Image: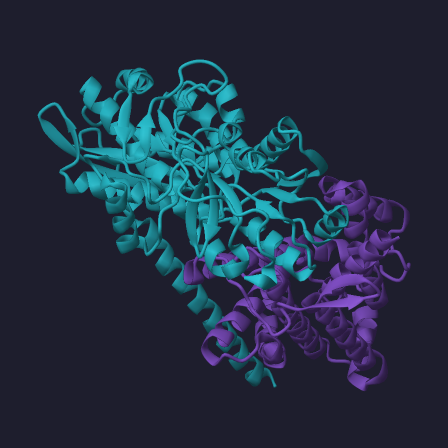
Chain colours: A purple, B cyan
Amino acid sequence: MGLFMQTTVNGILIGGIFITIAVGFSISYGVMHIVDFAVGEWIMLGAFTAFWLNQYTKIDPLLLIPFIALFFALVGYLFQPIIQKVVNIKHRSAAMMALAFTFGLSTLLRGSALTLWGFNNRNLVTMLSEMNVNLFGITVPAIRAAATVFSIFVTAAFAFFLYRTKTGITIRAAAEDKTVAGLMGIDGHRISRLVYAIYVGLTAMSGVFIGSIFSVFPDMGLRYTAFAFFVVVAGGMGSFSGAIVAGLLLGLISSFVSVYVGGAYVFLILFFILYLILVFLPKGILGKGW
Amino acid sequence: MFKKLSIMRGLALLAISGLFLSLVGCGSASTGAGSGASTEARDYYKVGVITSLSGAEVYGGNVTKYGYELWADAVNKKGGIKVGDKSYQVKLIYADDQSDPTAGANAAERLITSEKVDFILGPYTSGVTKAVAPILDKYKVPMITGSAESPTIWTQKFAYTFGTIPAADLTANSPLDTLAKLPNPPKTVAVLGVNDAFSKAVAEAFKASAEKKGMKVVKYDVVPAGTDFTPLISAIKQLNPDVLAVGGHETEHMQVIKGSKSLGFMPKAFVMHYGITTPDFIKNTGKDGDYVYGAAVWTPDLKLKDDLFGTVQDYVKASKEKFNAVPDYTQAGCSATGEAFSAALAKIGAKPPLSEQQREQLVKALEQIDIQTFYGPIKFATDGNWYHDNVGLKALTIQMLNGDQLVVGPNDMKAKDPVYPVPAFNAR
């Protein structure tokens, strides 16, 4: 029973890390119809920024999070028009152009990081790194607990923004049907930029947690690119609630498979389930995607 | 609005092109050494180096690069490789395998067909080595790897591939053997491994040696690279083994130590293999990395020497000066590869560039060499399961303390008694 509880909690904690990334990734896909291959690299850049700022200012990385989120939101805001321009090139398939462009961007960012900062693993130490909390006899690393709590908080705030504010409603409208939204007077370009900015900000912010849970190095984002795809496809393309459920599901499957079946089978089972979802629930587990 | 947008676009484009330029600039600087045009007549040896300069194993790839470079520096400083009455300089031509076997095979093909290298110094990972070896057999270009340790390289009996480090199944048993000889030996062991050629071989060897010594293996799991270890460590914590043995590289070792600490899991000892002596592991784990057991065939305080590098201490000094890094057995093993080639070239009197026939002779000469180096004896096996591997080196059990690797076994080699059980993380 103890092991079962521990496995469940671990699963939720792993899933917690994915939720923030998944939500941003999913909404940005919903609005822009762009699959961003560079999602892992935004994570990596967020982690590196936290690392360097921490080196020079000695401010705890966790306290740097608001700054990193804002800074990368700005980066995303400035960068989005370039993607848009590439995607809008005439006589080319927009989806293919977006894939090729972001794939190149991902390689470029990883290569630049490798050249600039070298291959070393770096340790991102936060005030919570050494601690663990005991919940009902289960030991939980404090930094992971914090990452999950934080991600729930951020996701809730994001949900509030999407469902309760005017801008949020326009974003959802654009995600649902860009053409009709455009006809209703919603500026699609402005919304796309805003959404991309939010997505990059959220993703870079998650990078701070991921960097402190594991370590910071140029290739650290790669595995999250694969997971982001899982979450978006399983949750239904562009679905907000679907992304949350899929993020948790991903964490729970990883955790239970590695404990009860064997770590060797995690990816196999994970992507087999994804295959089943694609075949039987093409709109995602909640049926809300498209 | 439109105007404002285009200014923004301009700014963003500027930022991107800046990134591009910095990449291109640095990129060409680091590969500049390899751009020499291939001419038939040259008075230096063109030496190909295939290793992981990007991708997941970029850290270790650079460890091998340090080793190969130190050899080239040392030999060029002496005038070059002496063949007959003349010495010939060596020039290293790098090819990045991107930590990927397929990319490694392409790199080998390119080094051979367009760079026309005389011989090759081998990859960091075993996976890449296994992909490169058939290409070398096809083109008849000899290679010595100073790093790859998977036993499966040697069982395939590649004619042109050699290695200076004994295979992992010859070395990985040493830490558990040392622990088994203690008055209170460990009774239970959990083994985790990463699914790559080297790490898996290490995990298998840990399991086999534990079972041979009568320890119970309570968990054995070989997982894909990139797996989150937390749930596995949680499960292992419930089983409460005396020892957690891990087959992996420095990144995974760091994650296991970090993960165990944050989950409050402290076995009586951690046993790992290659990676714990790297500066990254030492720096990032700090005191938490102390007391970890590992295996090595060479440590920086051995009393060995040769004509090229001088004593082991001279070699360590040269490495510290050039790379600010204390060498480990992989780096040293890489430096030793060049010594084997030098000896074999001198023996057959082959001047650069080498013809196909001379390369065939070079392989025969490599099979016959028996030299003493700062790394220990180099003599490649010519038959059996470790074909072309340098099996003569003795496996040492090491235990880390304050970033130093202390030899704690076998008994006739030890500098210190092993500490077991080790102090808990918070009691150091």
Residue A278 place in picture, x, y as percent: 84, 48
**What's the residue at 34%, 45% (across, down)?**
B300
Residue B52 lies left or right of residue B373; in this view the side is: right
**What's the residue at 29%, 48% (across, down)?**
B316
What is the number of callouts on the image? 0
Q: Residue furthest left?
A: B85
Look at the picture and state if B271 lies above or below A1.
Answer: above
Q: Quadrant of residue B152?
A: top right
| Near-viewer residue (B93 or B200) | B200
Residue B282 place in picture, x, y as percent: 47, 56
Q: Is residue A92 visible?
A: no
| Near-viewer residue (A109 or B238) | B238
Q: Quadrant of the C terminus of chain A?
A: bottom right
Q: Quadrant of residue A61?
A: bottom right
Residue B295 lies left or right of residue A103; in this view the side is: left
Residue B363 place in picture, x, y as percent: 32, 19
Residue B180 lies left or right of residue B383; in this view the side is: right
Q: Is residue A206 visible?
A: yes
Residue B176 place in picture, x, y as percent: 57, 36
